[in-house]
Amino acid sequence: MVERHADPQHLCIYPFLAAASEYVDTTGITLDDLIRAASFERARLRGKARVIEAIKDGTIRKPVIISPAQADIELSSYPFARILVSCVGDAYLVRRYALSEAKAAHERLSEDSSLDIIYEMSEEFDIQMDFFPHAQDQVLMAFSDYLRFTTNLRDKRWKLVNRGLKSGKVKLSKSDFVRVVQEAMYERIKKDLPLKVPNEICKVIQGYTVDIKRELEENRKKLGDVGFESLVKDPDSFPPCIKAILGNLKEGVNVTHGGRFAVTAFLLNIGLTEDEVIAIYKNSPDFDEARTRYQVEHIAGDKGGARYTAPSCATMRTYGNCTGTDDICEKVHHPLTYYKRKLKLKAKKKKEKTVKSKGQVEKDEKV
Ligand code: SF4
C-alpha cells in the first residue's frame, strides 16, 4: 500500500478516509475530551470554522500543516464539525457541508493526481479502475461503479451515450475520474449525517452552534433576497409541480435535469430574465454560475435555437415531476395554462370582491 496512506498530514486533506478515523482512534481522544477539554478548544474552533466556511464559501480551506500537533488539531476538528452539523439538524446544511468538504478534497486531489493517490482513492471507495496502457491521463472504469457515482451529475458529458466503452468498461479522462471520486467522497461524508447526537451533548456545545445558526440564517436571508418570491408577480399562482421544484431548489435538494429544465423554461416563458432565473439556482449547494448560465441561455434560445416552452403535464407526469395536483390541474394540460388560468380566477375574485364592497358602501349611504 502507498506509504503516505497513514501520514497525518495526508489524512488532514482527506479526513473522511477510513485511515483518518483509525488515526484519531489511536490518539485516544474521547468524545468528552472533544466537547469539553480545554486542550481541545483549538480543534473545536477549527471544527466550527469548517462549517462556517462551508456556509459562506461552499468550500473548506485546507491549512498548511507544519507540525504533528497541528495535524492532530486539524484531524479532530473533522468529527467535531460533524457533531456540530448534526446538532444544528438542518438538511440544507448537511448537504452544503458535505459538498464543501468533498469539493475541498477534490481540489487537492486535482492538484496532486499521481498514480499512487488515484489508486489509493479507488481502493478506498471500492472503485474498479485502471489506467489505459501507455496513456496515464486516461482511465477505464467498471461500468457499475460509473453508474453508482454519476447519477447526480447532470451535465450531458456524463451520460453513458456520450462515453466510450471498452470491454464493458467506461473510458474517461483522469480529470473526469477525479471528479467521479468527488462524488464518492460526497457520499461518504454525507453518510450517517445528521448523526444521532444526544441532546445533552448538543447543549454542551451550543456556544458553537449558535454562531453556525446565525450564519445559516444570514445566508438564507441573502439568498432569499434573490429568491423567486421577489422576482415574479404572483408565485402563489404557480402550479403545484413548479412550486415543488422551486421549493427543492430553495432548500438545496438535488433536482433532476428534467425538473431544472421544466422550471427554467416555465420561468423564462412567464417573463423572468435570464439573470433572474440564474439567481434562483444560487441556493443549490453545487451552484456553478457559468454552467447554469450556459444552460439557461440555451433554453432561452440564445444559442442560436428557438426558445423552449415548458413541458406539458403529460411529459411532467412521465418524468415524475407532476406532484401535488389540485382542482385546476384537472382542467389543464400544461403548467403555463394552469398559471394563466389561476391568475384569471384571482383577478375575477378580486373584481367580485370590489363590486360587492362598492355595493355595500352604496347601500350604507342610502340608509
Ligand atoms: S397536472 Fe400539470 S400543472 Fe398540475 S401539477 Fe401536474 S404537471 Fe403541474
Image (cartoon, rainbow, N blue to C red):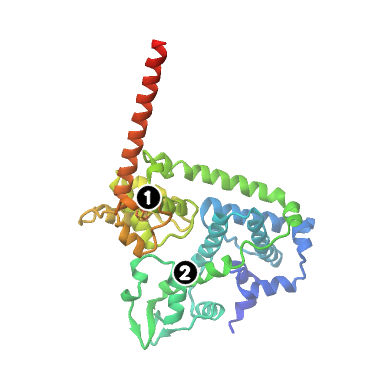
Q: Amino acid at mark 2?
A: Ser
The residue sitting at 65% across, 47% down in the picture is 211
Camera-nearest residue between 339 and 47 = 339
**Which quadrant of the figure contains the C terminus?**
top left
Whole-number angstrom distance, CA of label 1 to CA of label 2: 28 Å
Residue 75 against residue 305 in the figure, above or below: below
Q: Residues within 10 Å of mark 2 (few under 14, many from 20)?
A: some
Q: Residue at x 47, y 75 (%)?
A: 148
Residue ID for mark 2: 110
- For ligand 1, the image quadrant comes to bottom left
Q: Amino acid at mark 1?
A: Ile
Quadrant of the frame with the N terminus: bottom right
Mark 2 secondary-structure assignment: helix
Instruction: Give the residue pinned by disc 1.
Output: 278
Q: Is residue 231 above or below residue 301?
A: above
- Using the rendered view, name the quadrant where residue 147 is placed: bottom left
